[in-house]
Amino acid sequence: MQQKQMDRNIVEMLDALEKEPERIADFLEFGSRFYRYSLKNNLLIYRENPQAVYCQSFSAWNDAGYQVKRGAKGIKVYVPYQATLLKIDGNLVPLEQASQEEKIRYQAGEIESVTQQKHDGVKAVFDIVQTTCPVLARKNFYQIGYSEQMYPGMVKGLLSYAEQLSAMQKEEPAPLQETGEKAVSELIYQISHGISELEYLQENPETKFQEVAFGMMLENHFGIVSTQTRKDFLASSWKEIKEMNPEQSLFAVLNQTYKLCRKKIPEVQETLEVYLESPQKEASVAGNRPAEQKERKPRISNEELISEIKNQVQITEYAREHGFTLIRKGRYYTLAQHDSVRIDTTKNYYWRNSIPGKSGVGKGDSIIGFAAEFVHNGDLHEALKELKERIYIPEHYTPQPKGQLKEKQLVKQELILPERGKNMRRVYAYLTKSRYIAPEIVQDFVDRKMLYQDVNGNCVFVAYDSGGKPNFASLRGTLSDVRFLGDLEGCDYKKGFCINNQSEKLIVTESVIDAMSVMTILQAQGKDWKAYDYLPLGGTGKYEPILNLLKEYPKQEVHLAEDHDLSGVESMQHIQELLKREGMSAEQIHCHVPENAKDWNEALMNYAKKFKPVEELSFLEKEGLPEIHYCAIQSTKQIEEQGFRVRNGKHQYRLVELDTEGNLIPVSLTKQNTMFFAPQEVEKRIPNMYKKLPYEELLERQALVRSGALRSEEPAEKQKQVSEEIKQEVDKVKQEQAERAPVEQAEKATEQLLVEGFREDQNTLMVKIEYRGEKLEEAVWKERDKVYICTGMTFDDTYEKHLLSNEQIEQMNLFLKENHYELDETLPILQLKLCEESQEQKAVRTENYLNQLQQQEISKNQQVAATTPMMGMEL
């Protein structure tokens, strides 16, 4: 079923590209990063995430030492696997479809087998930006593009490869006058043309398509954006192919291009790197710093390095990336996993109240101590090694003599902007093509000198103070969806990145890209996007710039438009409270979140990719924050009920929340009846907008909701001190849960219940059933002489108890016999154990098996004798 849907997705993607041939160029740009994957997997990944950079499975990321971020959605792709086929009666039978006897004979070496490579296995993969892999460590996985300083070396390498092709064709490569990007691009298409002449015997529209397509993929692989002329030529070539042969498949043509890329790109790369010095080979334009900086890092003293780590790496961001859940407690944050921890975002410092410190208040430390204690098991060396990779040391950084560091820190660091590049092509292409920002808005930023491209091809966003002097600048890579950790040194965090249009209305976002996305949406709606000021905060928990801006330039309206996730919504709630304390009324504060996206840029991209009118996005038309649900992990240590019991000595875990009446109900994590035997398995599946509380705290909230002192959706910070009466109510609730028994309905054998088979799972007898059109898997129970299964849950009155019919019990007994199981009926839920055969039983079974083999051999010899002609007989 899953594979059929994946195949349908591939066909839909191909149909969309055929209907809009102009999009083929965008797909090939994506393919320049994924050409080593199969075309099918390229189409599947591109359909879900066109901005993907490097994908691996969940286990592969763990093996690499990084974790997939909570809530990240995997992309299903096809993977190869080894299939074992048994040679039975002249046919090849998959091992999993063989009978139990055939499997035993195969294990005994009596049945021959062959191994084939299959490609219809399915696995979920995650992009590198969905993991905790830091930006500067990503170059270990992929490399896209080179800096402009490396173009002369690239020209020499590409020219050498072109000369090799020319020698095979006995032609001289075209002479070049330049050594820059234009020369690189020209050589790439000379190589593409030379390869097409070697690979194909005649020139036709398909050959032209292959030539341009390969050239575009090679060009993008080296970080050069293809021109619109070549993109248009590619689209027209495909139209010409379809006119000549309407039955021609786009998949077949693209597949040829991908095969060519897998064969030739490594060859070109190998020749190219001979002409690039080894330190430079590690440099790329997509968020990776030039390798020259690596040579400068040893010149930084340990004191300066530690200072930079403390300034650039925020504890809250670091904690989220490593899977911790942050909970706001007034002006501090705490961790759901360690509720004694307090994090001060203004000082970027933490302490633990449960561990006494020198001050008597608690043990505390900076980001370095946090990383060592909570991530690296107390290993300070490993913590510093990881944190060192996360910081950016600018080119202008000069080490200070020892002893002057403290004096230096007292003086405000000067903001020095990176060197400008020669053009803006990558910035324009990234913002308009990848991020779908309106070109007019990008141009406005450029005209106001708030945006330019540096020599490494990165976006540089610049904000200015009232005197026109730069006071804030941040960087963003242009070839992948990457946000650098930290801004440029010398940024004024008290002012933030303010986009001042002299307006009385303010829109607050988390990033500059989100602000530009909001401007694009307003422009599409026909509104004047310059009628608002904008303040990107660069994340959550940064409130000082808002308060300072409103003191200097009071506003009539404030529109909060942070991300649609737990931290974004909590941040907007907190800002609301701050603004009300500053004297703003509730009518002046508005909150907006995208309905089906994490942030406003993702919402914009979703509409643009599907060719939906951007003006239909509901920014400024709808307002209000989504509800935050409060949940906790419950285990069978606290309560047992039908379907939620200790199994084989193992406790079960599930996620529960409160309904409007204060009843504890399970949260739907996956399909019904999925069992979890570790709290970590449940915690990984906590849905968006669910905030995990300790179980005892959720019970306190339950008592408050039942008493009418609190609504189930109210923020946890609004809880009042629990009175003695409420504490008694909590004890009463606990007692009710402990005494609660499942409500059993009348037992009956259900006609609509179809048993499809039995299996063993963790020594428990499970049955696969189909009931009311739904496929389920349930445990088998026995009470006295009644064998039954249960479906549904008690909390929603869907619980039912079904007796197995005599035919179904016979089917169960046959499964037990074939697999040599016997029942352990010491518990109501049926457990399995392997039968212990006596020596006589083993001898009889072996003798019967040998006799069977002997009879088969005799029968085979008789058949051979019957078909063999006797001597002297005519044929």
Image (cartoon, grey):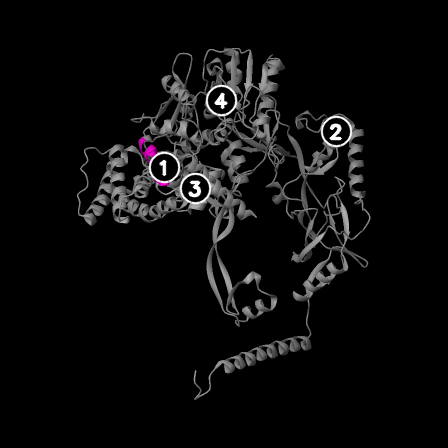
Kindly state the secondary structure of the residue where label 1 is placed.
helix
**What residue did someone put label 4 on?**
521
Question: Mark 1: few, some, or many residues within 10 Å (few <14, many ≥20)?
Answer: some
Q: Are marks 3 and 2 in contact (CB under 8 Å)?
A: no
Give whichever of 86, 244 is nearer the camera.
244
Front: mark 4 or 3:
4
Amino acid identity at mark 1:
Lys
- Give the mark, 1 or 2, whose residue is nearer the N terminus: 1
Residue 23 lies, in percent from the top left, at 40, 34
- Give the mark, 4 or 1, whose residue is nearer the N terminus: 1
User: What's the distance in space between the residues labelled 4 and 1, CA to CA?
Assistant: 33 Å
User: What's the distance in space between the residues labelled 3 and 2, CA to CA?
Assistant: 47 Å
Residue 832 lies, in percent from the top left, at 69, 61
Front: mark 4 or 2:
4
User: Tag on residue 54?
Assistant: 3
Kindly state the secondary structure of the residue where label 2 is placed.
helix
Front: mark 1 or 2:
1
Amino acid identity at mark 2:
Val
Q: Are marks 4 and 3 in contact (CB under 8 Å)?
A: no
- Give the mark, 3 or 1, whose residue is nearer the N terminus: 3
Q: Is residue 398 visible in the rendered structure shown here?
A: no
Residue 303 lies, in percent from the top left, at 42, 32
User: Tag on residue 239?
Assistant: 1
Front: mark 4 or 1:
1
The span picked out in magenta is: 229-243
Q: Give me the residue at 34% from left, 32% from top.
A: 232
User: Tag on residue 705?
Assistant: 2
User: What's the distance in space between the residues labelled 4 and 3, CA to CA?
Assistant: 30 Å
Front: mark 3 or 1:
1
Give whichever of 415, 781 is nearer the camera.
781
